[in-house]
Image (cartoon, rainbow, N blue to C red):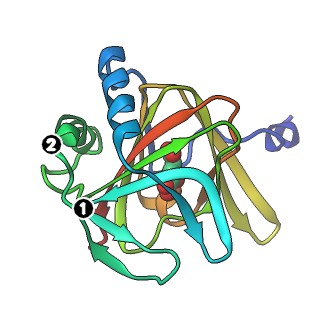
Amino acid sequence: MASNLDLFPTPVVSGLAFQGEAVASGEEADLIERIDEQSLSPFRFQQWTGKRLTRSFGWSYDFETGSFTQTEPIPEWLYTVKRRAERFAGLAEGDLVQALLIRYDPGAGIGWHRDRPVFGHVVGLSLGNAATLRLRQRRADGFRRAKIELPPRSIYHLSGEVRHNWEHSIAPLELPRWSITFRSLAR
Ligand SMILES: O=C(O)CCC(=O)C(=O)O
Ligand SMILES: [Fe+2]
């Protein structure tokens, strides 16, 4: 039976933490409304334009130029959830210095990647509709894979092994999803 287990993703990878119902549903509706009010831009990388719409606060990494710069401060409407994300991740107040807002319209996802090494901890809130966060780690004999369901209003934390030694992605979605990703700076 052991070989059979190999066919299925391992549910847990070191450094991955998850909690459901981290945001109340009224709060979720407010956050979605706020995100939609922002001027969001399509994620761009070289010739390629992603279908997801984004906006960064605090720090911004430009994938086209590789420049990493300080940008508009994280707005006050994000403070409560930022503080909650810090507590959930066992971080000190003020550790999460970047907020990335994303709207995934139907057909949008995010390809395989590791977050930029300038960042440290990654804490993400999911809003609107569920998605599956897929994880993979390249091994000599192929990929090791895992995945975690991200229901709306849930929170996840990527640190250590899963943050640095695994890639993650979200397959294109059928329903819209919004996310708020907070990050600390690498030490
Ligand atoms: O939408 C999400 O929860 C994931 C976003 C992500 O992986 C990223 O922006 O690096
Ligand atoms: Fe990411």
In the image, the residue with mark 2 has its CB under 8 Å from the nearest atom of ligand 1: no
Residue 141 shown left or right of residue 60 in the figure: right
Total numbered labels: 2
Image coordinates of residue 187 in percent, x first then y, are: 26, 73
The image's mark for residue 156 is none
Q: Residue 129 location in percent, x, y?
A: 55, 26
Q: Is residue 121 above or below residue 133?
A: below
Q: Quadrant of residue 72?
A: bottom left
Locate the N terminus by quadrant. Answer: top right
Residue plotted at (21% across, 53% down) = 74
Residue type highlighted by circle 1:
Gly
Q: Tell whether 3 sits left or right of 94.
A: right
Q: Dot 1: what SS?
A: loop
Which residue position holds label 1?
58
Residue at the spot x=36%, y=24% of the render? 28
Please say if 88 is above or below 67: above
Q: Nearer the viewer, residue 103 or 89?
A: 103
Q: Residues within 10 Å of mark 2 (few under 14, many from 20)?
A: few
Q: Which residue was labeled with disc 2? A: 76
Task: Name which of mark 2 and mark 1 comes first in the sequence.
Answer: 1
Question: Is residue 88 at least partly visible in the picture?
Answer: yes
Q: Specify few, some or many for label 1: CA neighbours under 10 Å numbering under 14, 14-19, or 20 or more.
A: some
Residue 162 seen? no
Q: Amino acid at mark 2?
A: Glu
